[in-house]
Each structure stands twice: as C-alpha cells, then as structure tokens.
Image (cartoon, coloured by chain):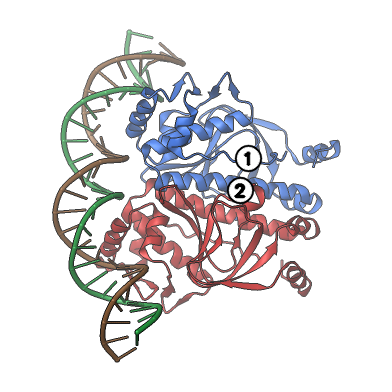
Chain colours: A blue, B red, C green, D brown
Amino acid sequence: MPVGKEDLAFIEAFRSGVDTLPAGETLIPEFRASTKLYTLYSGWAFRFKTLSDGRRQILNFLLPGDLVGLQDEFVDQSTHGVEALTDISFCEFPREKLWDLFRTKPEMGYDITWLAAREEQLVDENLLTAGRRNAMERVAMLLIHLHQRAQRIGLVEDGWAEFPLVQQHMADALGLSLVHTNKTLRRLQKLGIHELQGGKLRLVNPKALQRIAEWVDRPNRRVPLL
Amino acid sequence: MPVGKEDLAFIEAFRSGVDTLPAGETLIPEFRASTKLYTLYSGWAFRFKTLSDGRRQILNFLLPGDLVGLQDEFVDQSTHGVEALTDISFCEFPREKLWDLFRTKPEMGYDITWLAAREEQLVDENLLTAGRRNAMERVAMLLIHLHQRAQRIGLVEDGWAEFPLVQQHMADALGLSLVHTNKTLRRLQKLGIHELQGGKLRLVNPKALQRIAEWVDRPNRRVPLL
DNA sequence: CGAATGCTTGACGGTACTCAAAGATTGTGG
DNA sequence: CCACAATCTTTGAGTACCGTCAAGCATTCG
C-alpha cells in the first residue's frame, strides 16, 4: 500500500502544523480530559500512571512515528499522562476529525488500529516484565527493547543508540526502586554486557542480553505513515 | 448510533456461526500464528504470556462482548495465548474480511478501534498494579475490577458476582506467588472486606476496597456491538 | 562557587518467594 | 455410593530478593 501524493495532501489537511515541547514537560496531563491527538515527529516521550503517594509506572515509551493520546478518544477522563523525555516535535490532529478520517479514508483508519494494536503489544510485554521477570531480566529487557526500537528508526550509529533515559525512568518503567535499578545496571555492566554513557547505549554482548531477557526478535510490518 | 437490522445482517454475513470451548482449553496458542479473530459470546477467558521456565503472566481477562485476537492481525507471530476460563461460546470472524469491514462499514472499523483502545487501558491498569502496587493493593484491585466488569454485563445477582478464577489465576494476573496471593486474600477476608465462595464474589465493604486499591470508577461509553 | 540533579555504594529490614505438608473439595470409576 | 485421584486451598518455616534509608561523589548549570 504505497503512499501517494494525494494521501499526503490529505493527511496534511488534517494537521494543525508542527509544535514543540522541551524535555521534561507534560504533553498530556494525567487526570484531565485531553482534547487532542498527536503524532510524534521527533524526540522521545513516555506514557505513565501514578498513584496518590507518588509511585509512578511508565507504561511505554513513545518514539517518532507513534500516535499519542488515542486512548483518550474513547473515555471521558484521561487515564494516563504523557511526558516528553527529550525535546520533542509533534503535530496535532483534531480529535473531532478522527471519525471523518475513518469514513473518508478507511485504509487510514485501519492503520490507526494497527498502531493501537502494536502499542498494546508493547504494554503486554512490559506487563510480563514487571509481573514475572526478576531485576536482572527486567533491565536486560529494557536495554534490548529500546536499543532495537531505536535501531528500527535509525537512531543507532556505530552500535551506539540514543538513550535519553535517566535511571529513575528505567526504574519506573520496570517497577523497581531506583537503587536496585542502579545496582543491577552496574552488575550487567561489570559483566561486560553493555555500556551506557553520555546518553548513548551500546550492547557489547547482545547474545547474552537476549538470553537473560528471553528476547524474541519479532518482525514487524511496515509502519504506517500518519 | 443505534444498530439497525441492516447492520445486524451485515455482521452476520461476516460470521461463521457460533462455536464453543470447554473451560481450561486453549483458544489461541501462545507461539503460533493465529489466523482467526473471535468475538466472545458467553463465558470468561484470559490472555496470557509465559516465559520458558513456566512463569506465566495473565494480561487481562475477557468477558462476553470482547474481541479476541485482534493484535494477531498485525504481527506475523502470535505474542500471547488465550485460554478459556469457563466454558465459552464465541463466533469466528474471518481475518481476511477485516479490511473489507473497515472499507464498507467504517463506523464498525471505528468501533473495533474503540475496543482495542479500551483493552489497552485494561492492560495499562494491570501494569500499574504489577509494577507499583503491593500485594494487598493488588488483590483489592483485582476484586473490585472484576466485580465491576461483571456488574456491567449483568453477571451480578444480589451483590454476588460470578467469579470463576482459582487462586493461581489471581496470582498470575497480579504477578504474585500462589502462596502469597492466598495469604493476602485471607487477610482481606478476615478484615470483613469480601467473601469468596463457590465461584462467587461479594464485596462486603466496597469503600474499604476502593480506598486500598485507589480505584477510580470510570464511566464508559456504550460498548459497541460486534 | 553553590545548588540542583543524577549516580553509586553500604547497611539493614521487610515483603514476598520457595519449600513442604496437611486439609478441603471435586470429579471419576469401580 | 464409596474410594481414590486430582485439583485447589491453607498454613508454617525459612530465605532471598528487593526496598528504604543514608551518605558520598560526579556533573551540570546559573
């Protein structure tokens, strides 16, 4: 299903231009109804939920090409927040027009469903990780997973992948404490399994990591353009 | 968007009749590509993932009206299994026709996306639970959550909800061991917070449960018919 | 140069896991 | 209808993984 000029023009008509947000800022606040839908253009972000005493769980990370805020279309109250991990640029997609899009361009509606299903798979995997893997396995999982996602969209150079998370993000994504995350990271590093510095990640021994995490490389179809 | 006779007929045309499966059987095996898509008619099921040494994580429970196997449409390899918790009846939906449906009945494509987004919200909540709640909070969460879902589809009578899970299911859904799940359940029961017997669940003190689990009742739109 | 943020390490304690075994319940076949 | 197996529940004992607390170090930034 190649994308023609006509389709591009059509997408453009839905958009309200590109906008930006600096790292650390909130794109969608957690407990307020969000009226907007976005496509992430550049940079990293993450979805999260928090408990009243501050415990936070990162649900999944968002990379360029991901759709942001789709779930909100279907409830009256936002159930998760979205925060920029790096400076990001994104474009808004008017929520009211979503239905129009399904009607006039069903193949794009299909693509949106594809994106939703794909995101759910990420959360599925993260749930398995938080629920059933031990600390070592969790950290290994995160490293491989993010490295691979970065690779797929060209964010890896000479084996070094962009890696903008601080350890608190890793802890919140994995359901671990900050301290234990740190100790586990150091342990993996001493085993010569990865290097992590200056916001870059290199997998020195990917085979070992894959074994620890029981990683299965899963081929994906082309990512739809939105 | 009321459902007319025409729509019903249209849905019927997609279906290949109602089928059944006894409790405990596998509807979709975990590591094999699934070619089919189902709608659950009656009974309970659950989606799950396992690790090679047998550790299992239940991703979410499926109740009548839920769509089963949508995610598989979009990958080459199934990433999760689906197992019947009770005897179930379901109807098959030919995968090849999914695209047809988006094209010819965009409003139903929209509904499918709705269902996908809604299921992701369940998994989001479960991830928060497994990642950041302690045992007591986890069990409380599960009890409230399933009680409420049962209620919404009329499976509650005199406060007693259908509850077909054994403790191993609860453990696997919550990321706890069987033993600890049992001890936590007994503790809640002794506090006079719930009763659980004969496959039925009654919330004696729902307020207390809600406080423990930080449950927020979230209104939902009408569930689309499929 | 001081403040803020993030990383690292050690000590200690507790929540949750494992192992083990005894009841309770359900199902099945003789 | 009873006996036996299978499954599920319950409880206790011991342990370990991971969390909390605390403090020192490194880096960045204004």
B207 lies left or right of A152:
left
B96 lies left or right of B89:
right
Residues at discs 1 and 2 in contact (Cβ within 8 Å): yes
Element assignment for label 2: loop
Residue at figure coordinates x 50%, y 50% from the top left: B124
Q: Chain of mark 1?
A: A
Question: Residue B184's quadrant in the figure?
Answer: bottom left
Which three-letter amino acid code belongs to the residue tagged 2? Gln
Discs 1 and 2 share one subunit: no
- Residue A164: x and y in percent read 51, 26
For the residue carrying disc 1, how many other residues have a C-alpha within 10 Å: few (<14), some (14-19), or many (20+)?
A: few
* Image height of A25 relative to B222, above or below: above
Question: Residue A179's quadrant in the figure?
Answer: top left
- Residue A133: x and y in percent read 40, 43
For the residue carrying disc 2, how many other residues have a C-alpha within 10 Å: few (<14), some (14-19), or many (20+)?
A: some
Q: CA distance from mark 1 to mark 2?
A: 8 Å
Say whether residue A51 is visible: no
Count of numbered marks:
2
Which three-letter amino acid code belongs to the residue tagged 1? Pro
Q: Nearer the viewer, residue B30 or A77?
A: B30
Query: In this figure, which residue is indicated by the disc labeled 1?
Result: A219
* Image height of B172 relative to A139, above or below: below
A6 lies left or right of A90:
right
Q: Nearer the viewer, residue B115 or B177?
A: B177
Q: Chain of mark 2?
A: B
- Residue A115: x and y in percent read 65, 45
Element assignment for label 1: loop
Q: Nearer the viewer, residue B100 or A38?
A: B100
Say whether residue B147 is visible: yes
> Where's the N terminus of chain B, which quadrant?
bottom right
* Image height of B58 relative to B4, above or below: above
Query: In this figure, which residue is indicated by the disc labeled 2?
Result: B77
